[in-house]
Amino acid sequence: MNFNFGVVAEYHQLFLKGTLLAIGMTLVCVTIGIVLGILLGMGRLAESKYAPWNHILKYGVQWPVRIYVSFFRGTPLFVKILLFHFALMPLFIHPSNGWFVSGDLARDLRGEYGAFISGTAAIAMNLGAYLSEVFRAGIQSLDKGQTEASRSLGMTYWQSMWHVILPQAFTRMLPATGNYTISTLKDTSLVSAIGFAELAYAARSVAAATGKYWEPYLTAALIYWVIVTLMAWGLSKLEARLCQSERMHDL
Amino acid sequence: MNASTGTICVQNLHKQFGNNLVLKGISLDIQSGERVCIIGPSGSGKSTLLRCLNGLEDATSGKIQINGYDINHDGQNINAMRATVGMVFQRFNLFPHKTVLDNVMSGPLVVKKQSHAEAQAQAIALLQRVGLLEKTSAYPSSLSGGQQQRVAIARALAMQPDIMLFDEPTSSLDPELVGEVLAVIKDLASEGMTMAIVTHEMHFANEVADRVIFMDEGQIVEQNSPSKMFSSPEHERTKSFLARVLHHSL
């Protein structure tokens, strides 16, 4: 084996751009995923004591959320990325008859951002399904007395959620959310399959152009590793700080 | 102020959990400014009754009118009613992520949309009243149980309720902390607010209540002025219950 990292240096722009795109896509996916996860988690717990809301929430909200979460947790992400990109996207964004966007705008969107849109949608919706379970557990782990106390002051369901339940649940959700954030960075490499020029795609392009395999793929792997290590380090710092402030509450 | 402000009217209230009938036809009228203590053995339904009054439990059947609001089965009015009826819990239920001051301000800020300055001034006055002015920036977990319960009382009072409901406010406190909480409640009682207190503290009931209600097995067995209730109870069940608890505490 003759390592020649000169090919990597030659294409360093491609690796740099790929790294930035991978990080950017992760940030967008995690942001959407967290919001989606909270909404789905709350939907999963939605219930009412009063007719007709009890039936509407059970069959109109709880069950659809259950099915959504079950589907997204029960299918490979890679398959969903392909499904989104090649089947769903042409339905929604199509130059002649897109449901959401059509005409020239659709052509430009698909051409410029097609892989990014489908990849982000698939990963974010996937992440939302996983995080919804984290958030559901975080909300359910809180003492029922917290809801009762806030409601007894006259707070509505949403006020109680926003001011009392979610801030407490969020602290408990942080470690798992952090782990899923790290997974998401690695998951973005799958989007290279539909032509999004992130890091794995860059490595593949360089390999194809130069006939070298070790150098570009090893470089990409090392870059992922470094970012993941940095993220894990940042997370442990954040958790330590939260723990510390909780311990201060206990003093 | 209208005629029903501060009043509680319960008619033939039933509450069932699964197959377990916990309240078997409670009828009860509490006048404005009246202080009522509800006593009885564990499992007699007294806490359930109190929780039904502000809609934390739904009545299986029967009618509840509290502070002029009909508590119906459709949940209408329930938030508006709760904003005028304070509730204090056995386990305090303070918000652990908020300071003492923020706990007390939370109702006025969120529900009444009071200005921060107004809510804060009121919260400080209330904390002074319950003797915890020096704890404003502390978190609940750093307080003793008695202190936490006094904050919980201040938090409920911050909504300026017409009625206060106390669900065994001293039952989860260490014995030496009971007194400070009862003192705060007594202070409130002297102000003429309508109060319904579920309690095991017979001395306290004797001192504070206008009327004592004895419940057993989901029914009101007997109600009377505290002097009559504690000196000459009429029913056998009341006698045996009082004999048991007073034997320990008197």
Image (spheres, grey):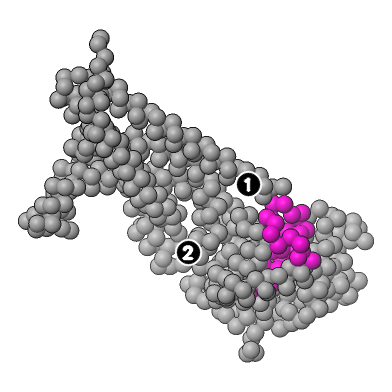
Chain ID for label 1?
A
Q: Which residue is mark 1?
A: A246
Q: Which residue is mark 2?
A: A158
Q: Residue B194: where, in percent of width, then height?
A: 72, 78
- Residue at position x 22%, y 22% from top? A7
Question: Is residue B60 something that shows in the picture?
Answer: no
Q: Amino acid at mark 2?
A: Trp
- Residue at position x 53%, y 42% from top? A238
Q: State whether residue A72 is above or below residue B151.
A: above
CA neighbours of label 2 inside 10 A, class few (<14), some (14 to 19), many (20+): few
Label 1 sits on a secondary structure element that is helix
> In this picture, which residue range is highlighted in magenta?
B131-159
Tell which residue pokes out farthest to the bottom in this image.
Answer: B2
Chain ID for label 2?
A
Q: Residue A200: where, in percent of width, then height?
A: 26, 31
Tell which residue pokes out farthest to the top in this image.
Answer: A1
Whether residue B138 is in magenta: the answer is yes
Whether residue A89 is in magenta: the answer is no
Q: Amino acid at mark 1?
A: Glu
Distance CA(mark 2)–CA(mark 1): 25 Å
